[in-house]
Image (spheres, helix red, strand yellow):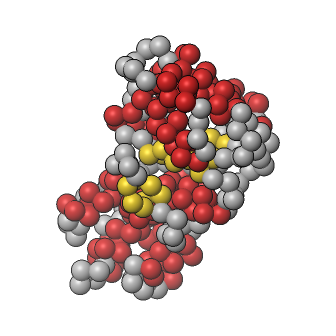
Amino acid sequence: MTVVAPAGYGKTTILARWAEADPRPFAWVALDPRDDDPVVLLRYVAGAMHRLEPLPPEVFDALSGAGGSGWTKRVARLGNALAAREQPFVLALDDLHWVANTSCMDVLAELVQSIPAGSQITVASREEPALPLGRWRAQGWVREIGTTELRLDEREAELLLQAAGIELGEDEVNVLTQRTEGWAAGLYLAALSTDTNFEVSGALLCFTWPARKVPSCPLWTSEELRFCSTGIVRRCARGPRDPNGRYRPSRSGNAGAAAPMGDRQRAGRLHR
């Protein structure tokens, strides 16, 4: 499954909530620019899967040494280990937009072929990944979630604002939701703006931008804009760092909601 939307739409949050609701264990990999190498990527995937259930030592032997080229045999070793898994699992790759190397995309495409029945790979990205999605769509292997599914409606926006301690009238909530196009981070920033002794109507006037672009608003500090650019909802969903210094999703957060999705047959390899 692919979850594709700009920053602040709650991609990580919905993955974290899905992990809470799904009985299958989740192997979570939070990517960053340092992972834009096929062998490095394979190592992190192997490490995440190893924490669910130990992998054969030969998998890590194959992944040792320098990265870069020569990943073909290495991905086959890891793929065989994943295909042999009897317990269904979900492998979640968050922030895939940091990975631009075409060899990394080839690695992921190969791993998808190895996912056993009942298991899934899901990726979250700010842009559509360079994977063979067209072929997978035709084969029924992929389910896709985008901004249309992630944007908040008026009732969800009202709940988000109430959680931030902001009480608005129905008309004001409707206007704000329309102007932000349901963008969760934009709604949250609206709450910050109206929480600094400014008139609510004045803050609403600032929200006249196309969603997904950071607006210029004199009521916002640089710190608030930094939160916006990195994704408010994603930050709220993060839990403690793992031994590698990477964030793990919180299992106790209550931001956003997602139910388990899709059947668990082989056709759902990349389902969410």
Residue 242 position within the rendered picture, expressed as x and y whole percent measured from the top left:
40, 52
Using the rendered view, name the quadrant where residue 161 is placed. bottom left
Residue 75 position within the rendered picture, expressed as x and y whole percent measured from the top left:
56, 23
Q: In the visual, does 56 lie left or right of 113? A: left
Q: How many marks?
A: 0
Identify the residue at horizontal 61%, vertical 45% (top origin). Answer: 53
Above-or-below relation of 17 to 143:
below
Residue 74 position within the rendered picture, expressed as x and y whole percent measured from the top left:
54, 20
Identify the residue at horizontal 63%, vertical 27% (top origin). Answer: 79
Q: Looking at the image, can residue 64 be seen?
A: yes
Above-or-below relation of 58 to 199:
above
Q: In the visual, does 97 lie left or right of 75? A: left
Above-or-below relation of 202 to 263:
below
Camera-nearest residue between 124 and 84: 84
Q: Residue furthest top?
A: 70
Residue 150 position within the rendered picture, expressed as x and y whole percent measured from the top left:
56, 57
Q: Looking at the image, can residue 180 be seen?
A: no
Camera-nearest residue between 173 and 9: 9
Q: Residue furthest front?
A: 57
Q: In the visual, does 233 lie left or right of 195? A: right
Identify the residue at horizontal 58%, vertical 41% (top origin). Answer: 54
Identify the residue at horizontal 44%, vertical 71% (top origin). Answer: 176
Above-or-below relation of 221 to 94:
below
Q: In the visual, does 260 lie left or right of 60? A: right
Quarter of the picture holding the N terminus: top right
